[in-house]
């Protein structure tokens, strides 16, 4: 009797202990959700704390939407990126608690119709007090290459290893290019017989030829200049195309003063207003 | 946790135990001793069954734990997982491209209410401070908070472009911040590396667009330089005046030097000008010796 009771007590104790162990070990259904939960945490920290879905397909979709949003926000579409890292830390540096790393980056993408490919190197030096990152080399390849104003700017950016200046300049340059195209195309569409674009919609000049006097032509040259600091400025000039006989008749020197008048008109009416009034005067 | 445990296997086992306890209690009333003995036997048998079941459960859970920790790294048995790997690779590639945006100087992360834009600055290849602007995408668009220094005309730029052209707003801010970073970098370098040339403290405002200092390049008297950067988007001064310290009239040579310095400050970054002074000094020293 006592032996059996003792056995009962022993069994009960054993069961209690096993129950405790069970409590500590996760059940099979519990484990899967724990993996999913930690994955979710990783993705949450990556994707700006948004409630990302547990499905990797949805995660990818979320990341891709983030990418297209950034592309729309910046105007740059990055299509490819690769990075290689090389450790330059010497034994002496390690003794002083300094770490030096060379990063080689390659970015491909486009800004509207202009595609770019950049290769640059960054040397990152990490000491106990601070971290310094320096771009040590920058190479830029751009297409199309017809924009001569851009090629000078690109060489300057490469020289100064000024990556951000390149992108800023590119953005403003493309913006002005697109505005010029829209403006010229607008006038071409509005006055197809009077206005002509010798190089197509992306032409840098626009010709205005009156139907009544086809020998007279006003040529508007619109250059987009990028200065030393990467600032983009439009430069508009008027080139009157006047036959020689007409010049001889021009006693008041109207033709000579036309370019200056054009520039003052720009200041008053703005680009579109000035072009509109010029076309009007030729009709 | 306890409540969850009660479902499933354990609940069943506990139920069995309860049942058994009730059976034991019931069996106590008639045939006292014998009944008790057989009840005990039954109890023991039930308890043993319960214990064995629990042991098996513990063993099973332990095995699952081991398998699961391996599974997280090698679940490549089915087509599904191969698909998952391809998805994973695509995901990594998209993530990498998202990271690459910081090299354009302008990047951002989506937030629950809009976007947090990060503007990076640099000067002559040196990567400098980054700033952020947290935007709430509503009508009207508004800045939730930001880390733009107070002396940068953020409100002015926002008033001009924020509602009509967000891209222009961001790039204008980029311009202003990069220029400020560049001016600050030059002033810091002067105060640090080339402090030996200064004969007095460098006077600078927080925007670093007005600098005033006295300096000396050779054994003769010092000059006072005043640099004004009226355009907040430039890193080279728009106005430079170099004046001699002291009251004596300048010799022709000194006047030439003054004019040359004025031109230098206008065309070269500040620290580069002083670097050239340092090189000249080295040369003259080596020539002298």
Image: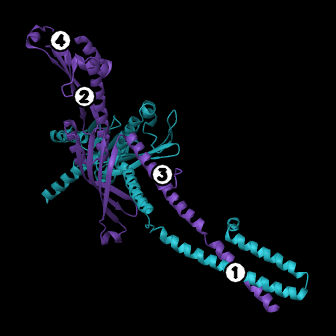
Chain colours: A purple, B cyan
Residue identified by numbered label 1? B51
Compare marks 4 and 3 and give the one earlier in the sequence. Answer: 3
Q: Is residue A252 above or below residue A220?
A: above
Secondary element at image label 2: loop
Mark-to-mark CA distance, 2 and 3: 41 Å
Q: Chain of mark 4?
A: A
Of marks 2 and 4, the one in the foreground = 2
Q: Secondary structure beneath disc 3?
A: helix
- Name the residue nearer the viewer: A261 or A50: A50
Q: Position of residue B114 (x, y in %)?
A: 49, 42
Per the image, the residue denoted by label 3 is A58
Rendered image: mark on residue A107: none
Task: Identify the chain of the residue marked 3, using the numbered disc in the image.
Answer: A
Q: Are marks 2 and 3 in contact (CB under 8 Å)?
A: no
**CA–CA distance in space, label 1 to label 2:** 86 Å
In the image, are marks 2 and 3 on the same chain? yes
- Mark 2, residue position: A201
Chain letter of disc 2? A
Camera-nearest label, 2 or 3:
3
Mark 1: few, some, or many residues within 10 Å (few <14, many ≥20)?
Answer: many
Q: Chain of mark 1?
A: B
Please give the residue where the numbered disc 4 appears in the rendered image: A254
Residue B40 occupies which quadrant of the picture? bottom right
Is residue B101 shown left or right of residue A188?
A: right
- Marks 1 and 3 sit apart, C-alpha to C-alpha, by 45 Å
Mark 1 touching mark 2, by CB under 8 A? no
Q: Are marks 2 and 4 on the same chain?
A: yes
Query: Could you tell me which secondary element the residue under label 4 belongs to?
Result: helix
Which quarter of the figure is the N terminus of chain A placed in?
A: bottom right
Label 2 CA crowd tier, 10 Å (few <14, some 14–19, many 20+): some
Q: Nearer the viewer, residue B62 or B238?
A: B62
């Amino acid at each position: 009797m006592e032996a059996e009771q003792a056995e009962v007590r022993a069994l009960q104790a054993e069961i209690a202990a096993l129950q405790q162990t069970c409590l500590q070990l996760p059940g099979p259904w519990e484990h899967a959700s724990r993996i999913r939960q930690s994955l979710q945490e990783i993705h949450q920290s990556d994707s700006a704390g948004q409630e990302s879905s547990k499905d990797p397909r949805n995660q990818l979709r979320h990341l891709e939407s983030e990418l297209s949003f950034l592309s729309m926000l910046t105007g740059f579409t990055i299509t490819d990126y690769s990075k290689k890292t090389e450790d330059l830390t010497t034994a002496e540096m390690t003794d002083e608690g300094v770490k030096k790393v060379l990063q080689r980056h390659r970015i491909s993408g486009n800004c509207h119709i202009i595609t770019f490919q950049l290769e640059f190197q960054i040397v990152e030096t990490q000491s106990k007090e601070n971290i310094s990152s320096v771009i040590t080399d920058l190479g830029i390849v751009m297409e199309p290459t017809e924009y001569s104003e851009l090629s000078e700017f690109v060489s300057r950016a490469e020289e100064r290893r000024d990556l951000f200046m390149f992108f800023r300049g590119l953005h403003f340059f493309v913006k002005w290019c697109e505005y010029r195209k829209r403006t010229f195309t607008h006038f071409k569409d509005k006055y197809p017989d009077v206005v002509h674009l010798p190089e197509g919609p992306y032409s840098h000049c626009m010709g205005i030829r009156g139907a009544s006097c086809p020998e007279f032509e006003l040529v508007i040259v619109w250059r987009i200049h990028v200065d030393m600091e990467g600032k983009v400025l439009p430069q508009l000039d008027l080139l009157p195309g006047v036959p020689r006989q007409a010049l001889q008749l021009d006693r008041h020197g109207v033709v000579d003063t036309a370019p200056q008048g054009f520039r003052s008109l720009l200041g008053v009416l703005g680009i579109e207003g000035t072009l509109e009034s010029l076309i009007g005067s030729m009709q | 946790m306890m409540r969850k445990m009660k479902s499933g296997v354990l609940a069943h086992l506990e139920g069995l135990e309860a049942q058994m306890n009730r059976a034991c209690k019931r069996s106590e009333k008639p045939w006292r001793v014998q009944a008790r003995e057989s009840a005990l036997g039954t109890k023991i048998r039930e308890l043993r069954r319960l214990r064995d079941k629990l042991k098996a459960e513990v063993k099973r859970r332990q095995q699952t734990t081991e398998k699961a920790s391996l599974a997280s790294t090698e679940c490549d048995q089915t087509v599904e997982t191969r698909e998952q790997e391809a998805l994973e690779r695509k995901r990594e590639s998209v993530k990498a491209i998202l990271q690459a945006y910081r090299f354009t100087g302008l990047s951002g992360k989506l937030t629950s209410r809009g976007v947090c834009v990060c503007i990076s600055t640099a000067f002559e290849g040196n990567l400098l401070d980054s700033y952020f602007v947290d935007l709430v995408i509503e009508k009207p668009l508004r800045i939730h908070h930001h880390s733009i220094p107070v002396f940068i005309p953020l409100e002015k730029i926002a008033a001009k472009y924020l509602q009509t052209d967000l891209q222009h707003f961001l790039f204008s801010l980029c311009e202003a911040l990069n220029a400020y970073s560049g001016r600050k970098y030059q002033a810091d370098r002067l105060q640090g590396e080339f402090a030996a040339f200064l004969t007095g403290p460098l006077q600078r405002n927080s925007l670093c667009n007005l600098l005033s200092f006295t300096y000396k390049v050779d054994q003769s008297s010092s000059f006072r330089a005043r640099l004004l950067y009226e355009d907040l988007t430039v890193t080279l001064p728009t106005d430079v005046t170099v004046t001699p310290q002291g009251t004596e009239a300048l010799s022709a040579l000194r006047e030439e030097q003054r004019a040359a310095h004025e031109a230098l400050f206008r065309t070269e970054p500040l620290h580069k000008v002083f670097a050239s002074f340092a090189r000249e000094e080295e040369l003259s020293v080596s020539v002298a010796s």
